[in-house]
């Protein structure tokens, strides 16, 4: 998703953190990859990976089928391309929903995760602080 022109990558990240908090999704990892690359002596466009999770939903999904561990935690990349345009990238969350046939008690939880991650991304794209 392309970040709106008037939204910096930093504001996008702040917006996503705030939105995640509103949904009670915890930021469980914050990986400033471009900083690491620069510390290793190479130039890099901005690239940061954020990982969000509702641990209780994650546990229930993995208890049902370990395949869901491969989707955990939900990762969202924030980066700038060579022209300085900001982007937000995450996986197609419908893949998670369609990975296996979910029982009736888990389907709403998986849908909630998908909808929440997309709402977090939307907040970042638009800079909704």
Image: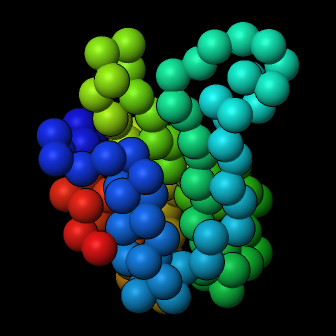
Task: Tell me: 115 left or right of 72.
Answer: left
Coloration of the structure image = rainbow
Q: Quadrant of the N terminus?
A: top left
The residue positioned 69% from the left and 80% from the top of the image is 55
User: Looking at this rendering, what residue extends furthest in the right direction?
Assistant: 40
The residue positioned 40% from the left and 28% from the top of the image is 80
Looking at the rendered structure, the number of numbered marks drawn on it comes to 0
User: Quick check: 32 above or below 116?
Assistant: above
Task: Tell me: 120 left or right of 99.
Answer: left
User: Quick check: 121 above or below 112?
Assistant: above
The answer to which quarter of the image holds residue 60 is bottom right
Image x and y of residue 45, in percent: 51, 22
Image x and y of residue 91, in percent: 45, 43
User: Quick check: 105 above or below 95?
Assistant: below
Residue 109 in sight from this viewpoint = no
Image x and y of residue 58, in percent: 66, 74
- Nearer the observer, 73 or 86: 86
- Nearer the observer, 3 or 6: 6
- Nearer the observer, 26 or 55: 26
Q: Quadrant of the C terminus?
A: bottom left
User: Looking at this rendering, what residue extends furthest in the left direction?
Assistant: 5
The residue positioned 46% from the left and 42% from the top of the image is 78
The answer to which quarter of the image holds residue 42 is top right
Image x and y of residue 113, in percent: 45, 72
User: Quick check: 28 above or below 38?
Assistant: below
Residue 27 in sight from this viewpoint = yes
The residue positioned 16% from the left and 40% from the top of the image is 5
């Amino acid at each position: 998703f392309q970040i709106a022109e008037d939204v910096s990558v930093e504001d996008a990240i702040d917006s996503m953190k705030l939105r995640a908090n509103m949904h009670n999704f915890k930021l469980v990892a914050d990986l400033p990859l471009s900083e690491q690359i620069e510390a290793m002596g190479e130039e890099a466009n901005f690239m940061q990976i954020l990982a969000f999770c509702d641990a209780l939903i994650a546990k229930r999904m993995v208890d049902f089928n370990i395949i869901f561990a491969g989707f955990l935690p939900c990762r969202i990349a924030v980066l700038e391309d060579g022209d300085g345009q900001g982007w937000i990238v995450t996986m197609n969350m419908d893949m998670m929903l369609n990975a296996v046939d979910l029982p009736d008690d888990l389907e709403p939880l998986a849908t909630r995760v998908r909808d929440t991650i997309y709402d977090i991304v939307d907040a970042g794209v638009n800079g909704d602080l």
